[in-house]
Amino acid sequence: MFDPLRTKAKTVGYTAIAFIFGIGIASGLGWTESSLAMPVLDQTPQVAASAVAPATDLSDAFVNVADVVTPAVVRIEAEIPTPQAVQEMPQGFPPGFEDIFGNPQQPRGPRTAGGSGFVVSDDGYILTNNHVVQDASTLRVYFPNKEYVEAEFVGGDPLTDVAVIRIPTGSVQGTLSFADSDEVRVGEWILAIGNPGIGGGNALDYSVTAGIISAQGRNLSLLRQELGDRRTADGDPLGNFTIEDFLQTDAVINPGNSGGPMVDMSGRVIGINSAIASLTGYYQGYGFAIPINLARRVMEDLIEFGQVRRPQIGVQIDEVSPEDAEAYGLPGVQGALVQEVSEGGPAESAGLQQEDVIVAIDGETIGYVSQLQGKVAMYRPGDRVTVTIYRDGREQDITVRLGEAPINTQVAAAPVAEPDMVERLGIGVQELTAELARELQFAEAGGVVISEVQRGSPAFRRGIGIGARLLEINDVPIREVADVGRVLDSVEPGAVVRFLLGRADGGSRVVNVRMPS
């Protein structure tokens, strides 16, 4: 007969025995000895707060600036048609499957490039580097919360490496304000901020590096090299019209934060990070940024005209050497030496001559060639400027009505034929034949299999792989190839498409992909 009191007594007894037995084992293992107790960690500051207050204040300032600026810094991914994007057969697939993937030597699909940018207005305009977005057929902008939107290409200028893109107004999550980059001082602290992001911003979100302004007015001729042998409609080398007036910093600038903002300690943008301004494209102990005053002027033209209307004086100029300064009676080694005056140009009409030395524009001192180019770029064709020159040892002013350089710097998005929905997602499909089913180790033939996934495409980015069986799209069974196009044609741009994919072992998985706009 069941006795509750007796059963309870047994339970208590067994528990006591188990406890004593456990203590014995722990003692034998040394777990109860004080010598093996967890150490007590001391968190007392080793240095008095007052002794490091300046450094702590600077650190707090960096944190505060980064907190304010980063919401407006975005990751830009550009799909660029290129012969280098090759669809290769993954390892492990049996021989004879090459026909599905195509010849690896036959290029197909886009490549994906990327960089950073920053939102400058509530109506969705974003500044970035031209080399980040040029020739893109599709632009995608990622935000801090991992959401993304399609972006519109507004215009780009390879002569300054500045570009403007635009996102829908309702998607803006923060904007940045501008400083006057002409007021930047060598030695002042700055932050270079970017959003490198890998795989749509799922890793390495945001990078903030600190440094000082090391120098101003750096002309590295790197944009000229990038343009190579490209020429204007008149046959002049396009590189002759580049404007390189970089700010130099010791902050780290690499391709990931290229296109992002360089900000002062008030969180205002003073430049656009440019990784192209290095011998390798990667950090080499120094970095460079495009002054925001120049970038702003370029942006205004790109928004208004879709291209930059480049003003020009109509002269060929060189740096002033100590010997030039002595020969022409200059007060110092500064200015831009006129070597040639273009026939029929604004300078000739105004009376400028060979061997004049330009030392100021509208009263602002010119110290070197790139500074003159940068100052002139702030105007528009047709503006009148006062050019101060030295001639025969005497200073004089000449009024010049600026002309327009004979170039068209618009970099349009690459024209592409309107693709169907399958191509827009970046997949190819084919019937799952008996032979193919054996090669892929499916138990039976029939239905549709993924035969191609373009690199950088929405399907590729979401992990859809070649060789998967396509069971359903948006809950609609897929039994033949024609079903795929029929279902996808009814999907609105921007909508999420649900794919049910089958594996050879009988399992399945769901992948949601957003349809490109």
Image (cartoon, helix red, strand yellow):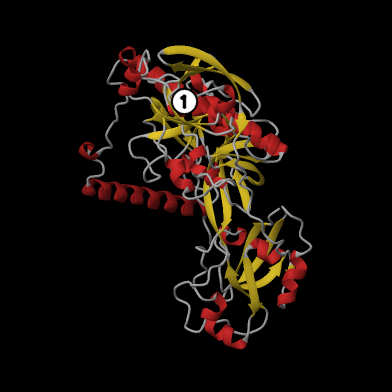
Report which quarter residue 268 is drawn in.
top right
Q: Position of residue 367 (x, y in %)?
A: 42, 21
The residue at the point 51 percent across, 36 percent down is 260
- The front one of 81 and 160 is 160
The answer to whether 143 is drawn above or below residue 8 in the figure is above
Mark 1 is on which residue type? Gln
Mark 1 = which residue? 371
Q: How many marks?
A: 1
- The front one of 384 and 435 is 384
Left or right of 368, for residue 39: left
Report which quarter residue 453 is drawn in.
bottom right
Q: Position of residue 99 (x, y in %)?
A: 55, 80
> Can residue 174 be seen?
no
The answer to whether 149 is drawn above or below residue 360 in the figure is below
- The front one of 27 and 135 is 135
Q: Position of residue 173 (x, y in %)?
A: 64, 34
